[in-house]
Image (cartoon, grey):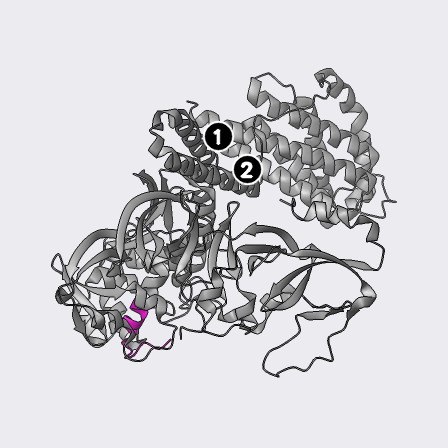
Amino acid sequence: MNDLKEPKKEGHLEEISYDSEQIIVFKQAGEEYGLHIDQIKEVVITPNITRMPQTPHYIKGVANIRGNIIAIIDLEEKFGLKDDQNTSVKSDEQCYTLVVESEEFKVGILVNEVPNTLTVSTKDIEDSINIASSGEVDQDYIRGIIKLKDRLVILIDIFKVLNEKDKDLIVGKNHVD
Amino acid sequence: MKSKEQEYKEIFLAEAIDNHVELNKLLTQLEKKPDDKSAVDAIFRITHTLKGNAAGMGFKDVAEFAHLIEDLFGGIREAKISLNPDLFGTIFKSIDVLGQLIEAVRDNKKVRFLGIKTKLGVILKSTGKQKSATKKTQPKRNSLGKPKSKKIEDTPKQENSKDQPIEEADVEEDGIAKNKVAFSDLVQVPVKKLDNLLNLVGELIIERDRIIATSQSLNTSNEYARLNRISSDLQYSVMDVRLVQVGFLFNKFHRVVRDVAAVENKKVNLTLEGTETEIDRNILQIISDSLIHLIRNAVGHGLEIPDERKKVGKKEEGELTLKAYAENDAVFIEIKDDGKGIDINKVRKKAMENGLITHEEAKEMADRDIALLIFEPGFSTMDDVTSIAGRGVGMDVVKKALDAVVGTISVDTKQGKGTTFTLRLPSSMAVKGTLLFELDQEEYAIPLSYTESVVSLYRSEIHKVGNRLAAVHSGQTISIVFLKDLFDSHKNVTGNILHRTFDQLHPEQKLDIVVISHNGKKAGFVVDKLFQQKEIVEKPLSKPVDKSIFFSGVTIMGNGNACLVLNVAAICNLIFSRNLSGQGKITY
């Protein structure tokens, strides 16, 4: 199950100290996003996705991953980073699925390429309070910004993303009076 | 196969041995902390249960002996008997004897327990005396030469110790055998472990189907015959483990009936039939509340008070029958009373007042369908509210529970003669027969328990009726719904949602329609393409898509794809609630 994350962890073993964190980095619409390694279960090649009616646009459907049926989410759509025209074109490229798991949730996130691991020291993670918000979107799920020499990684809390208000929108209830 | 008698005995033994172990544990606890009230309560409770079980099974010795210990702890609980080391010795010995008596049920050995029984009797009697003595004849007691007994509790203690030496020898002679560790022939397993096991078997079946499907082209189907058989056997064995007899639930209803009857001043005779019918444990759990509701309702609303019954020439005692039987893959549970029956006209009137049906519908609907309206949310015919039933909540719980397990209910009522509710339940939740169909290039499954037939109609045979669609199918008008329109209904579309696809079609277009029936209502779902029937293992949907109103779960196909399972009950409720409330436009 953890075959993908275990060896990588070992590779970075020497670098791990008390104030460092392991981050899985993946690209979404040209920007780099990071997830804490604890939230990730595995990375698989995206299986056949069954579309599910009456779900928000960013839920692509459900898929069978090792006998577990989980919802597949397109973060680019969730974050509003995708315009309508390239929606259909892009979906072919999203050939990997990042399986994230908590006690409450187990979902798959579509990514374009195999994510990398990154070990950063805690001091490199900057609080994100200073980022201007559009006011519409609640940006609680951004845990911080990781600044490296020439890179900028947005560290997100995937479960906060899923727990957002529009979670109620997922399927039904609001559409039916 | 083992006889039912034998099976019951084994279950009794398993429970009794557990009880015995628990008693020993609690008693040791109590010895360390004699003022532990909860331990005393627990012992009292356990011995009480044990007594009840033993009496029910006809093991007189165990029942009598457990009764004595129960009484003893009853006394301790009410502080009539106080605990001291001597008494503990006696209690431990009596628990040992109790253990032997339980063992004796299995191997029919003779256990001599009269000595210890008499001793317990003496202890109890002395407290009885003590009670009356302290209450009424305090001076007399003083005259007996114990003027200094300050506390009530002191006296029995003394009496106990006085009795002790006399009885001691007797007990030793009885020859209490050395403590043996008893092992039960039954294993108790948490349901969660069983669920897990069933899930794994489900996956195994899916995997098997996948392998067989991929290798079909290689013409090696015989290769897998054994695999097929073994995995099927495994699946049925696991399902079998989860089956319990409905009697376990039914037997609890004696009390429910008694309590309701007492409050309502009614006389009820409860008869249980087919208690050995087996059903999946989870299903039984889900519908247990519903059954209680139906029973309370039958006693509260169905049966008349004795005077009334006499007037119409019935026995004073109302007859309530709970009957279970298996047929095909389903288990039927009947709740039958010989009361006054449901007043259909009253239901009809009430349903109109509550806006559940329109005036026209009220005229057209058959009595049988009208009776089912009592299961609609917010319906109650009882004008006065009693604590037992009639708050207008409750009966819709029955419907919800049935929808959850894909069951149905029907009502058969005759004015003055009584009412019979018949619940049709699947015997196992593990495997569901479904019909597969395609819609918008996705495969879906619809449970066979709801599908009535499959028909093919031309578009021209479907008519617009107001804002909906209808067609005549075998002499009956049924509502037609394009599932596609229903699924797309949240997208911002203008115009009448249910007519959308219909309007785009050519009149000569042939349409595949699945006719479903749910609680007496029928509807036809238009699908793109029909596939074969398939037995599936349904899994629940996980977060964040678990709140879907259209799908009850999901299954994995032979090709590894996920396939959504339609929640027919919910879809029907959605379609028909609109129908019933007579609202104009569908607004999502």
Query: Residue at (29%, 67%) from the top-left corner?
Result: B576
* B240 vs B341, nearest the viewer: B240
Residue B302 lies in what quarter of the image?
bottom left
> Which residue of the protein is positioned furthest toward the front in this rendering?
A150
Identify the mark nearer the N-term, 2 or 1.
1
Q: Is residue B440 above or below residue B284?
A: below
**Residue B279 image point, x, y percent:** 41, 40
Q: Secondary structure at mark 2?
A: helix
Is residue B92 at all visible to an observer of this figure? yes
Residue sitting at x 56%, y 21%: B106
Q: Chain of mark 2?
A: B
* Rendered image: mark on residue B52: 2
Percent across and percent down for residue A176 are 40, 73
Residue holding disc 1: B8
Q: Quadrant of residue B111?
A: top right
The residue shown at (35%, 30%) is: B218
Q: Amino acid at mark 2?
A: Gly
Which quarter of the image is occupied by the N terminus of chain A?
top right
**Looking at the image, residue B342 lies above or below residue A42:** below
B112 vs B142, left or right, is: left
Asked if the magenta segment contains residue B582, the reply would be: yes
> Are dots 2 and 1 in contact, CB under 8 Å?
no
Q: Residue B236: where, in percent of width, then height?
A: 42, 33
